[in-house]
Image: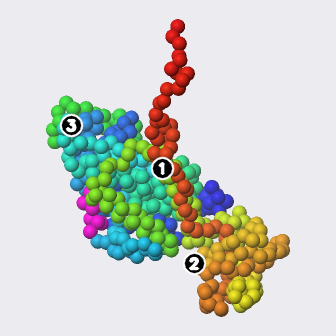
């Protein structure tokens, strides 16, 4: 937790309402997201119990498994879920755009992509479990399933895998999205409760966030957002209803279970759409669109893989694949953190406190300064920035500015104690002419920010082919060739 976030939590406790910790929204919210609220059977991690799903806040679809331990009923539930999810997902495959690629051939990308919202991180993990338990099912032979079931499993696995990518918004947990933008007066563990989190941020009229969050802890008023249900509900309501269904599997007994589960899902369904409204009320960050374009590209590639008849995702990554995936996630995390800081002055302020960035006023500028002579002469404007921030970068450090894309400067000199003067040499982003492009060099009196955080392209690590790794890492075992000592082995 950063110092500014800790301060925001203290203010939330003092004022009784959640405090914003960003100035813009750092996640994409689709015009028509699909909300998916799953429930699982207690003690059975991958056994679905019920789900409320849909894109219309006023007309959710309730899906129920009257006996989750019954294999046929579970896969019938998954087939019903596929009837809702697959048309929504595949509807985005129709409209595409041609994207020009520098140094390569143009390619097609879907104009939009689906977005699935779940209440919390546990809900996203359940999506992955449900995908794993269904994507390998057969549509013929013993225990066949509906053809839509394995296809749904592959899509759910894709969404669950993509949700681990920092900055991706194809599958998004509401608690994580809200916690990214507001600080409450409760612990991080309590923020995982969607009801208390939303009530801290948007309390009812006449109540503080702390009071509303306290009431939201009552499981009778605000049941858990899943996928695990309340133990009291399980023992007192659900167990007798399931037992009645086992004795007499009639429409009446199924309806009894459905009505009981609806009481657990309806409050969370309303909270999910309140969360969507809260997020939409924030202005979108500049680089959110770029990350969504990356999501759209990933979605397009997966649809092409399905169209080409590619196999289901493997149960686990090989050694080389796991290393490549981990390296990719690390690069994505570093890039995501930098993009958020460039988009948001509040987040950049955290780096200013640690000395990784500084903000100040331009007090001197020499836009025509050059270095070298003759043909080797280069335009290198000089700018002096006066700041009260701690500057821990040493001369020679290359810094960038969130105010100017493609702009880079080298620190030439740092002087002063309480008031620091930083002399910068502009090395990139001022054009190719003999004079700098208008606006590319900060002017005297302008407020600027510079940071050593960079979002430059990072190439992936060089990894060996799986066939070249030792057998302990998935490669082929070495061929056994008996030695002379083996041939001379004596038997006693």
Name the residue carrying label 3. Answer: 143
Badge 3 density bin: few <14, some 14–19, many ≥20, Cα 10 Å: few
- Boundaries of the magenta span: 85-94
Question: Is 283 situated left or right of 297 in this image?
Answer: right
Name the residue carrying label 1. Answer: 465
Of badges 2 and 1, the one in the foreground is 1
- Quarter of image, res 446: bottom right
Image height check: is 202 above or below 232?
Answer: below
How far, Cα to Cα, is label 3 from label 2? 57 Å
Question: Is 262 situated left or right of 164 in this image?
Answer: left
Of badges 1 and 3, the one in the foreground is 1
Q: Main secondary structure of the magenta part?
A: helix
Residue 224 shows in the view: no
Name the residue carrying label 2. Answer: 405
Image height check: is 4 above or below 282?
Answer: above
Counting from the top left corner in percent of width and height, residue 349 is at 65, 68
Counting from the top left corner in percent of width and height, residue 469 is at 50, 43
Badge 2 density bin: few <14, some 14–19, many ≥20, Cα 10 Å: few
Secondary structure category for the residue under label 2: strand
Circles 1 and 3 in contact, beta carbons < 8 Å: no
- Whichever of callouts 3 and 2 sits on the residue coming sooner in the sequence is 3
Residue 53's disc is: none
Residue name at image x 15 percent, y 38 percent:
250
Reply yes or no: does residue 145 show up in magenta.
no
Residue name at image x 19 percent, y 38 percent:
141
- Whichever of callouts 2 and 1 sits on the residue coming sooner in the sequence is 2
Residue name at image x 25 percent, y 36 percent:
71
Badge 1 density bin: few <14, some 14–19, many ≥20, Cα 10 Å: few
- Quarter of image, res 421: bottom right
Counting from the top left corner in percent of width and height, residue 26 is at 50, 66
């Amino acid at each position: 937790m950063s110092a500014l976030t800790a301060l925001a939590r203290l203010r939330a406790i003092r004022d009784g309402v959640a405090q914003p910790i960003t100035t813009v929204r750092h996640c994409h919210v689709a015009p028509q997201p699909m909300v998916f609220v799953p429930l699982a059977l207690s003690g059975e991690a991958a056994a679905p119990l019920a789900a409320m799903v849909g894109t219309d806040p006023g007309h959710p679809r309730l899906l129920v498994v009257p006996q989750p331990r019954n294999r046929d009923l579970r896969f019938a539930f998954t087939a019903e879920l596929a009837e809702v999810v697959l048309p929504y997902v595949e509807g985005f495959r129709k409209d595409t755009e041609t994207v020009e690629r520098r140094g390569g051939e143009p390619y097609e990308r879907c104009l939009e992509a689906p977005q699935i919202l779940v209440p919390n991180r546990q809900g996203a993990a359940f999506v992955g479990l449900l995908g794993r338990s269904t994507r390998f099912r057969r549509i013929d032979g013993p225990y066949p399933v509906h053809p839509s079931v394995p296809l749904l499993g592959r899509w759910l696995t894709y969404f669950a895998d993509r949700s681990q990518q920092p900055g991706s918004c194809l599958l998004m947990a509401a608690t994580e999205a809200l916690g990214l933008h507001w600080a409450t007066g409760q612990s991080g563990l309590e923020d995982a409760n969607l009801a208390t989190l939303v009530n801290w941020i948007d309390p009812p009229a006449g109540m503080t966030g702390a009071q509303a969050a306290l009431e939201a802890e009552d499981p009778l008023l605000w049941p858990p957002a899943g996928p695990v249900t309340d133990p009291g509900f399980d023992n007192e309501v659900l167990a007798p209803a399931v037992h009645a269904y086992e004795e007499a599997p009639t429409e009446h007994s199924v309806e009894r279970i459905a009505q009981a589960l609806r009481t657990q899902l309806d409050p969370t369904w309303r909270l999910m759409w309140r969360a969507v409204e809260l997020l939409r009320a924030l202005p979108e960050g500049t680089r959110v669109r770029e990350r969504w374009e990356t999501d759209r590209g990933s979605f397009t590639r997966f649809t092409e893989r399905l169209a080409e008849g590619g196999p289901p995702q493997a149960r686990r990554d090989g050694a080389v694949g796991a290393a490549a995936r981990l390296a990719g996630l690390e690069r994505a995390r570093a890039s995501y953190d930098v993009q958020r800081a460039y988009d948001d002055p509040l987040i950049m302020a955290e780096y200013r406190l640690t000395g990784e960035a500084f903000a100040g006023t331009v007090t001197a500028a020499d836009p025509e300064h050059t270095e070298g002579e003759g043909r080797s002469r280069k335009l290198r404007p000089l700018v002096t920035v006066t700041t009260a921030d701690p500057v821990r970068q040493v001369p020679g450090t290359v810094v960038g500015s969130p105010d100017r894309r493609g702009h880079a400067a080298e620190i030439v000199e740092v002087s002063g104690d309480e008031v620091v003067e930083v002399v910068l040499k502009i090395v990139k982003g001022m054009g190719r002419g003999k004079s700098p492009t208008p606006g590319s060099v900060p002017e005297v009196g302008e407020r600027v920010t510079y940071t050593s955080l960079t979002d430059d392209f990072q190439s992936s690590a060089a990894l060996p082919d799986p066939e070249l790794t030792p057998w302990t890492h998935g490669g082929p075992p070495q061929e056994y060739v008996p030695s002379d000592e083996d041939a001379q082995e004596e038997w006693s």
